[in-house]
Amino acid sequence: HNLQAVSQETQRSDTPPHKHQQQTYSAHPIFRFVIQTSDRSVHPYIHQTFKRTHTHSRTIMIRSLSQSLSRRRALWSSACRHSLSTTAAAATTTTSLPTFGNTIHGKEDRLLVIGSGVAGSAAALIAAETYKIPVTLLFAGNIPDDCNSYWAQGGIIYRNYDAESGDSAESLADDIHRAGAGLCQDDAVRKVSEEGPRRVEQLLLNGNPYADVPFDRTSTGELSLCLEASHAAPRILHYADQTGKIITQHITRAASNHPLISMQSQTLVTDLVVQDDMCVGVHTLDRSSGSRDMELATRGVVLASGGLGGIYEHSTNPAGFNALGSSVALAVRAGVQVQDLEYVQFHPTSLFIPNESRFLLTEALRGEGAILRDANGRKFAQDFHPDGELAPRDIVARGVFDELQKTTKHNVYLDITHRDRDWLHSRFPTIQSHLSQRGLDLGRDRLPITPAAHYTCGGISTNLDGCTTLKGLYAAGEAARTGLHGGNRLASTSLLEGLVFGSSVADFVGHNEQAAYLHDEATQRVTKLLQSRRRSHQIIEPTHIDSVSRRAIELLRQVRRVMWDHVGVVRTPSGIATAQEALGDILDEASKLHSVCPTMETSGARDAASAGNAVALACNENPKSAGAHYMTHDFLDDEEQQVAAAR
């Protein structure tokens, strides 16, 4: 409004423009940029107003600007950044610019990242290193590599630059679309296919200040690339069968060593802090002390704490808090849009040992020739798909599930005994170590398997920058629904998605003009919160904590049982209705327990029930089978259901 007033006053003036005033005014570099910039579509009213005020005195111009720019700081700063980029395009770091108006100089002027896996670490590193934004990285474990990314066995997609391989961005995009049952969002697929190799090189191969991961190499020193199911070319980087472990160790170490990134362990995020329809922080619970706090941030909050595979009775996800759907639950409680939650991917080959947690037998085993057999040794994979063991995961999972229903005894096995034993031990040392402790051997034994919940294809709805439907809130990695996976995830896309979209969130926060405006809004809201902030202390008797925690653990068991029995590999309308009723009751009780006694156990049970309820609701609203979401009719008999499930 002040700029428009200057314009109107200038238009009314009968004073002719003075040549020396025009020259002095135009000589100022910032003013010259606004007059000369060709990008009038971004700031047209500023451009035209500056042009008109060419005829007025520079004193009036500066006085009016000083009154208006405190409210337009973000818009002005983005214009300055654009000007600097046009004159110093080769610069690789962000230049600090003067800001106007109130600014928080304390720890709250930061980006909060929830989750220390690949997506969270990528977001933190790009924000800190490229844009010099302070980052606080919160995670539930004792150490940063206590996360789901650590357990990825197979590998990460790169690019096979050998012309004979036939690999390309287009080839990878085709594979992702095919695996996703035609439900993938094409712009997300193209983004990952095209940007993926560059992000792998930047964050995992180039070293300081990022990571330098010692992936397996060939005898000639070239990066070793393997083939996995549903891939048209060998394009998978790996480190034996510990790819997630080695990547996580190196990228979290890089984040820990960065001077602008602070790590906060044993921290559970229990709820988002929302002020006037904007996320400005999180409520936290310290696992070690039980104390509660509120962490505020003017740069936004990134949810990157993984998926919800752990809410199932059979799951490849590790025990603990990481896979209980905390990010989805936080979003649901805050009214943030979630999407595609019905597409929970079940890995077809997890090791089945009674009374033990399921253990992942990587896709790479089938890529190296492992065969699915029944108890009689018969190969059955081609019964359900021409590609057999290399068919998309959802199809293989239903084929294994169907075979398991045929007898009361366990009758599905994974067999790779035809490969050299020593080679198997060197290629899959983690798996062999786990098997050895149970008297099994890759080169000798057929391994009993069952499908298990593995990956969340849906999640919190985001755009390609990681923005959610709540201002100031971002999501990346398995927590997010980017549209990349559609109805079913292609093998080895998860780590790559985390790198690409975690980096994109940081790029948006650090360089986008809209994010600069959001920073200004958040600063005002955080300032008000700090002025009115009151700390509360609640003393809870240890005996009460114990009894409540035991009940919360039992509620979590109930969630897992309900999800596996009624929202599993094959679903029915009546089963979904049963699950919704049961999960609603569990959620009510878990929420009450958490309100009176906030602990890790009550928080986990509440999040799991909330996420499970959201999955059941999504299944109920989508009766159409596709990808990992398979619905069958209640009136089919057992045999018909089995046949339908295997298709």
Image (cartoon, helix red, strand yellow):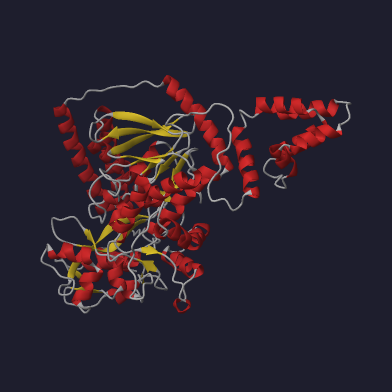
Q: Quadrant of residue 436?
A: bottom left
Q: Is residue 6 left or right of residue 470?
A: right
Image coordinates for residue 629, horizontal then vertical, percent: 37, 58
Measuring from the top left, give residue 78's x and y in whole percent: 61, 40
Residue at far left of view:
439
Residue 1 in view here? no
- Image: 464 above or below 437: above
Q: Is residue 410 above or below residue 100?
A: below
Locate the N terminus by quadrant.
Answer: top right
Front-most of 159 and 627? Answer: 159
Q: Quadrant of residue 258?
A: top left
Residue 455 placement (x, y as % from top left): 33, 55
Question: Percent position (x, y) of residue 270?
Answer: 33, 35
Establish if 204 lies above or below 396.
Answer: above
- Depth check: give the residue in front, 19 or 454: 19
Identity of the residue drawn at 44% across and 34% down? 297
What quarter of the picture does the C terminus occupy? bottom left
Quadrant of the rendered structure where residue 590 is? top left
Q: Is residue 72 visible?
A: yes
Please tell me how many numbered marks the rendered image carries: 0
